[in-house]
Image (cartoon, helix red, strand yellow):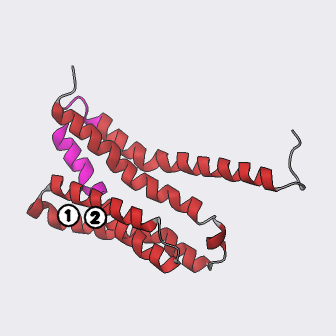
Amino acid sequence: MPLRNNDIQGLFISTFSGLSYGVPIAVVSGILGEPKFLELSATTRAFVSSSLVFGITFGAILAVILTEHIGRRLIIIISGFESFIFAALLSAMFQASAIIGMRLLQGVGIGAICTIACIYVMELASDKYKGTFVFLFQDGDMNLPLLVFQYQLWVLEEYSAKKVQHGNRRKK
């Protein structure tokens, strides 16, 4: 049975909604390991790390309130643009307070997307694909941060292998 137009829309929404949550959560672990963030206090690094989740909480509440007024599709579109814009602005920030603010605002869009996406996908998809699409959403939420974190560890290991000339390194 070929995919219908609604199935394709559901596949797109479930995949990219999961990624919109998974990527920002995973990227912060690599950012906090950069030299400019090592001099920050543990409290400030904790705020940088948790500000996205705080914004996600507000976004989830806002999405529930606005769903009946403007519709699920429009919430997903607006939240996606909002999340993208603040992610782009975040890449230009150097101060910890600006990063915390941008991640908080980015989290509002991500929270709205993640709250509405599963419901909207369940309405769009045919019965045959509903479970698969919700799985893809959860896969983007949970497994993508793990893969990004593994990649960051690999890059760190390769970087340290080039910089460390002595110590307890294995000889090749």
**Residue toward you, 115 or 83:** 83
Residue type, label 1 = Val
Q: Is residue 136 above or below residue 25?
A: above
Image quadrant where residue 130 sits: top left
- The residue located at (63%, 64%) in the rendering is 33
- In the rendered structure, does residue 146 fall within the stretch colored magenta? no
Callout 1: 10 Å neighbours few (<14), some, many (20+)? some
State the predominant SS element of the stretch in magenta. Answer: helix
| The furthest residue to the top | 1
User: What is the number of the mark on residue 140?
Assistant: none
- The residue located at (17%, 29%) in the rendering is 4
Give the quadrant of the C terminus: top right
Residue at mark 2: 60
Q: Is disc 1 placed on a helix, strand or loop?
A: helix
- The residue located at (36%, 66%) in the rendering is 86
Is residue 112 visible in the rendered structure shown here?
Answer: no
- In the rendered structure, does residue 117 fall within the stretch colored magenta? yes
Residue type, label 2 = Ala
Q: Is disc 2 placed on a helix, strand or loop?
A: helix
Image spot of residue 17 (x, y percent) = 32, 50
Say whether residue 117 is left or right of residue 72: right
Please give the range of residues in magenta. 111-131
User: What is the number of the mark on residue 64?
Assistant: 1
Q: Is residue 71 above or below residue 171?
A: below
Q: Are marks 2 and 1 in contact (CB under 8 Å)?
A: yes
Image spot of residue 97 (x, y percent) = 48, 80
Give the quadrant of the N terminus: top left
The Cα–Cα distance between marks 2 and 1, rounded to whole angstroms, is 6 Å
- The residue located at (47%, 73%) in the rendering is 99
Image quadrant where residue 113 sits: bottom left
**Residue toward you, 5 or 14:** 5
